Image: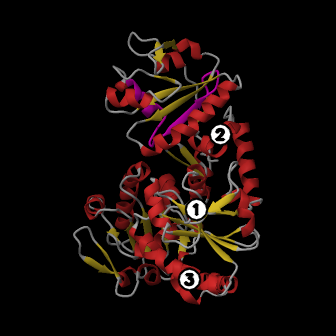
């Protein structure tokens, strides 16, 4: 787990949570609880809002963990820090929570101050303080998702142990650990019948992450169906398992009824969400390949289906061939092989004018994977703009190209309008193949491509955050130079990048 810049900071809960003339918190039934009653308790500050879908999705998991900890007699409490916009929203949302909250009325400024104090950029966020008010972690949301109460009391030692357990689980990955849940050892077909997961042993499994409402999924699914049916006719030992990202059951049923393979039941939402996180699914469609021994052998084989289609038999042999081709293509990569597809051989400026990809030859290019609705992207972008202008002043053989998947043209246009660089056009088919280059990492991502067209840095974002324009041209040699300069007498900054709640070692 990444280092946490808030760890070790100490706060007095009375001073932190009290308002003018108010020394209490409230429960959803209206009961008041004195803030000093939190003394000696491990306390979680829960930043959330009713209008936030990920928050509503996380609440049941947090409620389950909270109830179980209390049933075990643990000295633990949660305080809800609302980001709701009205008292009515707050009351409706808080009514389903069993913990405490800062009262909504008259506390909006205080909630904003606390939010800024802990650098909360995204919600839900869960800040954990120990019994003495020391921050244990600036965000325990993923810990609760991954480990539940096993992460309690969220101490560095406990977190390290959880990470070790998780890494061991990856090493010892099996079909059961991936596809089963405590109450389910089967998958379902679209006629409702159940198939034991143990029946899939010895097969190559293609885990298909998709959602009916995404056009690229609707376009890809028929191709996968054709390949699958032919492989089944030839009795190839392959199976596809749908991991639907649909949010409502009717959408799941509509997409699954056309599919001839198996699926994780819609009702097992936790398993579906956990798998999307486990495999770092950034874009869909995504096709994770699990080998015959239950181990992951490819993070996303959508291109395999696109390239081989009906010629995919036998999968085990053809897939080895595909991986070798991928390696060869990577070694022969140029900016044109990255950014062109048939007649799509251009990028655009903010005014809509086209720039031939050929004009980027010989330049260092940053492919900027971003999204308008990401708080991290919004915070990072000014740093990138500043670095962009400084680098361009020194060397015009540099450019940034936005790769952005937005649902609406208007949203894309408004987002792109604030940028001084180039972009792949909205809804361009190249976007989906390029997104797979970002390797499922959380946005924003910067992929640095050198003058010769080869990738020189898989994520230059951390370099921009730490070194700004001085990181150019983002090569390994340049990073070593900067690390040597930075580490000479500046131990605190050496090799560590902090952004929001995450600190990462470069």
Q: Quadrant of the C terminus?
A: bottom right
- The residue depicted at 34 percent of the width and 65 percent of the height is 393
Measured as percent of width and height from the top left, residue 200 is found at 72, 69
- State the mark number for residue 148: 2
Tag count in the figure? Answer: 3
Measured as percent of width and height from the top left, residue 98 is found at 53, 26
Q: Give, as a single range, the part of the protein colored magenta.
A: 110-134
Label pair 3/1, CB-CB below 8 angstroms: no
| For marks 2 and 3 on the same chain, the one whose residue lies earlier in the sequence | 2
Q: Nearer the viewer, residue 287 or 448?
A: 287
Quick check: 329 above or below 439? Answer: below
Secondary structure of the residue carrying numbered label 1? loop
In the picture of the structure, the residue carrying the numbered disc 3 is 227
Of discs 1 and 2, which sits in the foreground?
Answer: 1
Measured as percent of width and height from the top left, residue 96 is found at 47, 30
Q: Nearer the viewer, residue 215 or 494?
A: 215
- The residue depicted at 64 percent of the width and 22 percent of the height is 131
Q: Nearer the viewer, residue 355 or 489?
A: 355
Q: Is residue 395 left or right of residue 47?
A: left
Secondary structure of the residue carrying numbered label 3? helix
């Amino acid at each position: 787990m990444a280092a946490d810049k808030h760890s070790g900071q100490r706060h007095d809960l009375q001073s932190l949570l009290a308002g003018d003339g108010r020394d209490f918190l409230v429960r959803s039934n209206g009961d008041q609880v004195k803030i000093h009653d939190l003394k000696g308790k491990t306390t979680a500050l829960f930043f959330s809002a009713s209008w936030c879908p990920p928050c509503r999705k996380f609440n049941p998991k947090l409620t389950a963990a909270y109830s179980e900890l209390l049933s075990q007699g643990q000295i633990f409490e949660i305080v809800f820090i609302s980001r709701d916009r009205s008292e009515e929203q707050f009351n409706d949302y808080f009514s389903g929570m069993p913990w405490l909250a800062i009262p909504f009325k008259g506390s909006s400024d205080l909630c904003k101050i606390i939010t800024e104090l802990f650098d909360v950029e995204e919600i839900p966020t869960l800040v954990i303080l120990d019994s003495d008010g020391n921050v244990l972690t600036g965000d325990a949301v993923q810990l609760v998702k991954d480990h539940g109460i096993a992460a309690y009391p969220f101490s560095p030692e406990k977190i390290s142990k959880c990470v070790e357990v998780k890494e061991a689980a990856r090493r010892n990955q099996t079909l059961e650990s991936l596809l089963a849940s405590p109450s389910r050892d089967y998958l379902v077909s679209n006629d409702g019948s159940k198939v034991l997961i143990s029946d899939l042993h010895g097969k190559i499994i293609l885990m298909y992450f998709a959602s009916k409402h995404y056009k690229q999924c609707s376009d890809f699914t028929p191709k996968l169906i054709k390949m699958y049916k032919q492989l089944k006719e030839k009795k190839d030992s392959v199976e596809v398992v749908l991991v639907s990202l649909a949010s409502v059951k009717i959408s799941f049923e509509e997409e699954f009824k056309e599919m001839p393979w198996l699926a994780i039941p819609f009702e097992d939402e936790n398993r579906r969400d956990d798998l999307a996180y486990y495999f770092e699914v950034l874009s869909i469609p995504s096709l994770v390949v699990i080998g015959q021994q239950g181990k992951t052998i490819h993070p996303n084989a959508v291109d395999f289906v696109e390239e081989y289609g009906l010629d995919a038999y036998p999968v085990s042999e053809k897939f080895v061939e595909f991986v070798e081709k991928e390696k060869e293509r990577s070694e022969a990569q140029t900016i044109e092989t990255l950014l062109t597809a048939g007649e799509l051989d251009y990028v655009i400026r903010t005014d809509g004018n086209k720039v031939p990809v050929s004009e980027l030859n010989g330049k260092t290019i940053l492919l900027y994977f971003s999204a308008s609705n990401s708080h991290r992207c919004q915070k990072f972008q000014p740093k990138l703009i500043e670095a962009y202008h400084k680098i361009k002043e020194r060397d015009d053989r540099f450019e940034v190209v936005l790769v952005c998947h937005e649902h609406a043209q208007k949203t894309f246009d408004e987002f792109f309008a604030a940028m001084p660089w180039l972009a792949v056009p909205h809804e361009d088919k190249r976007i989906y193949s390029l997104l797979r280059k970002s390797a499922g990492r959380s946005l924003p991502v910067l992929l640095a491509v050198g003058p010769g067209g080869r990738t020189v840095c898989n994520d230059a974002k951390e370099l921009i955050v730490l070194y700004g324009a001085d990181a150019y041209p983002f090569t390994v040699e340049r990073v070593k130079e900067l690390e040597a300069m930075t580490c000479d007498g500046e131990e605190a900054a050496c090799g560590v990048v902090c952004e929001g709640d995450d600190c990462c070692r470069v």
